[in-house]
Amino acid sequence: MELALLDMLGIFAVGTVILSLLVGEHVRGGQQLSLLYLLQLVIVSFMVSSSESTQFSSALTLELQGVTMSWRLDGLGLYFALITVATALFVSVYMVGAWGAHYRKQGGSLPLLHFALSLNVLTMLLLLASGDLLSLFIGWELASWSAFLLMALAGGTALKSALRYLVYAMAGAMMVFGAIAILVVEAGSFQFAAVNSALVQLEAETSLLLLLLVVAGFGVKMGLLPFHLWQASAYAETPGPGAAFLGAISSRLGLFAILLVLFKVAGGGWLNQSLAGVSSQTLLAWVAVATIIFPTFTAMRQNDARELLAWHGIGQGGYMLLGIAMMDPLGAAGGLLHVFNHATYQAALFLAVSAVIYRTGSSDLNHLGGLVVRMPLTFVTMLVGIIGLAGLPPTNGFVSKWLVYRSLLEQGEVLLFVGAVVGTLGTILSVYKLIHNSFLGSLRLEHQPIREVPWTMWLPMLLLSLIILLSGIFPGVPLQWVSAALLSIGLPVPEFNLGGVVAEGGSLDMRIISGVLFAGFAMAALIFYGMGGRSRRVNPLDNYAGGHFLYAANRYHYSNNFYAGLMHLIKPWYRGLFQRIEQAVVRLLAVAAGLVQGIYLQAQAGRMALVVTVLLLWWGSYVGQGGGGL
């Protein structure tokens, strides 16, 4: 049965890819694809809930150059697979009907979009089911190229951003390839168990090199600093539902691979190494904090809703890595739980922004406002999503961030805690800008005829909002999946119940917190509606402020260049450091490429002959003096 489940999942994933090209153009075909994603989700859910086995293996093996590749799903892979397939299901439903018709009307190829989505799911499942280092690398490359296809579909600016991603991805792949080559040479095998046994004999310098190659190589996909510059523009330019999928789970494949290699393969020992007297664990934690802070405050500066969310996607990855880097029960659970939580509200927010674009034709926050009266369901989705993104109760984002904060304080990492909190403050400011400039204030005249999006679009958005709330009130459900994932890679698991975690010095029960919170809201509503004075309804084209009614003739709603004063104060922090570093690397590579090109084209034959002659004379004199030879 175990063999059949994983193979059946693969058959459905392959079938979805094939069917997407055949029937993806039509509404009924899109419905069939959504049904296939639902069937995949049922299979993965059964595997996750099964108590019979902690690992599901495939009957399929492949021999390549004498190396046998195999595939299996354990707790870690199943956790990421569950999020992957569920996100694809919500996105697929969103694409059926009105949005898909609109996309075709604008010249987009809906079958190609369905194909790119299904191909991403298939290749990501191959990666998540990797049973050895070779299948891991092949799955990694296939997933990277599939993501490129989804990013490049829109052409134009999107293609440029996708090509930029491709350069980063290829550089990261070379680092991963280097790490795998070292491991295979040391172990003489691609199998995880053999590599794990051989690592105890590695020198400290080699272990440190491997740690840097693994974190940097896989961290490119995750958007860790300083490899983050590609992600925001690439995700923002991807067609709406595709951006929701990429932002929710695709970028988390880097975290999966880091966890797999650092803990399942290496046993976590590499994090005990030191660099310049500082432990690797501490350095990794500070990389995570830097990834939280800089992209988050960069998000605050964005005036395009899609880019704002994409920048936040980079910053939220920092919380995941920070919790894992603590390697204690609370931190590890918080970091891994944040993967699920972020997927829910990031997908919801991207779909909400896509709904705004569908109705208004714009994602420019300087040209929106007042849409709450025209698109109330989309507003509710964005409201719940930004509360989750900001990490406030009763949403799931509060739970995972609380676990990470608690872990930092228990381990005495006060500076790391302050850095994480600073990132959260920046998140709150920027998500308020997102919802204020989109939905609050007075409605623009050109948006007066707008109405809510069709049900095929608002249904997945509201379901995601419901998941954000329910998994915040009852976090014990996703914590079961997190615990299985942590156990599969040898990390400790916290004690938990349906409402939260049980820990010495203070537990977390979201059922009590949510009950008190909802009771407060109920009392406030009773006072406002039952005991308040007379109210006056204001036309959405008008506004109200400071005790005065301001009418449409006086355009009071101000959203242009939001937080201008704050941006003036923090502008010195943004001097384009990472952009300048990237440009310097590009220029150096261009010079090196020019030299190499000159060698092959013999454009500088005389100079090259002189260089070779000098080197030969130096070598001859070195040998003649007894320096040795070849």
Image (tube, rainbow, N blue to C red):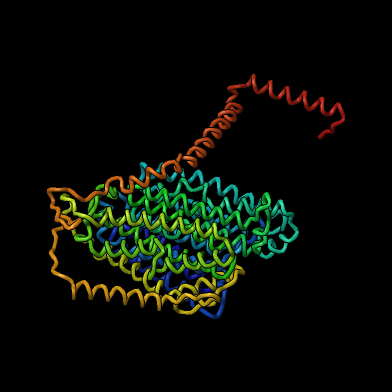
Q: Residue at x 60, y 51 (%)?
A: 176
Q: Position of residue 207 (x, y in %)?
A: 69, 54
Q: Residue at x 14, y 56 (%)?
A: 549
Q: Depth check: 597 or 522 in front? A: 522
Q: Position of residue 147 (x, y in %)?
A: 45, 53
- The quadrant of the image that shows the C terminus is top right
Q: Position of residue 180 (x, y in %)?
A: 64, 54
Q: Depth check: 390 or 375 in front? A: 390
The picture quadrant where one finds residue 522 is bottom left
Q: Position of residue 450 (x, y in %)?
A: 18, 56
The picture quadrant where one finds residue 592 is top right
- In this rendering, position of residue 570 left or right of residue 109: right
The picture quadrant where one finds residue 55 is bottom right
- In this rendering, position of residue 393 left or right of residue 371: right
Q: Say if 549 sits above or below 397 in the image.
A: above
- In this rendering, position of residue 21 left or right of residue 314: left
Q: Residue at x 45, y 79 (%)?
A: 498
Residue 29 visible from this viewpoint: no
Q: Residue furthest right?
A: 626
Residue 8 visible from this viewpoint: yes
Count of numbered labels shown in the rendering: 0
Q: Depth check: 180 or 542 in front? A: 542
Q: Say if 63 sits above or below 276 in the image.
A: below
